[in-house]
Image: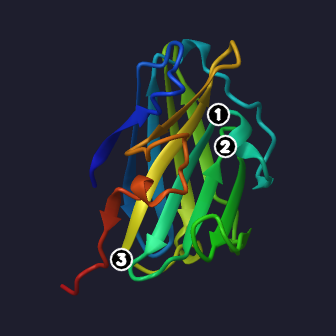
Amino acid sequence: METYELAPHPANPPLAITSVQARILGLDAHWLTLRWRIEGAGQLVVPPFAGKGRADGLWQTTCFELFVQPDGGAGYAEFNLSPSQRWAAYDFTAYREGMAERQVPRDPVSTPRRGQSVLIFDAAIPASALPPLPWAYGLSAVIEEEDGRKSYWAIAHPEGRPDFHSETCFAARLAAPTAP
C-alpha cells in the first residue's frame, strides 16, 4: 500500500510539525489497519486517554480521519480516530448531507506511540464496518499544537477553506480484491 505525504492546508500552517504521513497498512477479513506518522511533534497536543467508545467532536483537537466513498455512489463514510481511544463513524448520503451514525460492530483499536519529536498513530477499523470495495478514500489529520494552533492535513485540498468532505480529498483508491 502507498504511503501518502499529507499536505497542510495553506491557510492553516503548522507551528512545529514538519511532516505528516499516512497509509493503509493492510485489509483482511477482520480489520483495516492504518498508520499516521507525525514528525516535529514536540509541541503536539495529544488528547488524554479516555477509554474506548464513540464520541462526537473529536476533530476539535488532534484527530486522525479516514473518508471512504464506494465507486458509483454519492454517499460516503467518515471515521474519526483519536489518540484518546475515542472514535466516531458517520454515513453521508451526499456531500455533507444525510449525516447519520454509522454502525460499527466493535470499537476500533487505536495505539499512539510518542517519542521526543515523533508520534506514530496506528488504528484498526473492523472490516465489517466498511463499505464494499472498490473505493476512493482520503486520509487526513487535524493537528493541534500547544499554542492552540490547528493545522489540517490531507492528501489533497480543495480551494478555499479546509474541507475533508470535499471529493478533492478522496484522492486515493483501493481496488476490490482479485480472485487468485
Instruction: Give the camera-side residue of 96 and 55.
Output: 96
Q: Quadrant of the C terminus?
A: bottom left
**Residue at horizontal 79%, vertical 52%?**
56
Instruction: Give the camera-side residue of 170 and 117.
Output: 170
Q: Position of residue 107 (x, y in %)?
A: 70, 62
Q: Which residue is mark 2?
A: 82
Q: Residues within 10 Å of mark 1 (few under 14, many from 20)?
A: many
Q: Position of residue 24 (x, y in %)?
A: 39, 54
Q: Is residue 76 left or right of residue 90?
A: left
What colouring style does the render use?
rainbow
Which is nearer the N-term, disc 3 or disc 1? 1
- Nearer to us of marks 2 and 1 is 1
From the viewer's perspective, is residue 10 above or below residue 84?
above
Q: Which residue is mark 1?
A: 62
Number of numbered markers? 3
From the viewer's perspective, is residue 178 above or below residue 130?
below
Q: Is residue 149 left or right of residue 86?
A: left
Q: Secondary structure at mark 3?
A: loop
Instruction: Give the camera-side residue of 47 and 134.
Output: 134
Amino acid type, callout 3: Pro
Mark 3 to mark 2 CA distance (whole Å): 26 Å
**Residue at horizontal 50%, vertical 41%?**
160
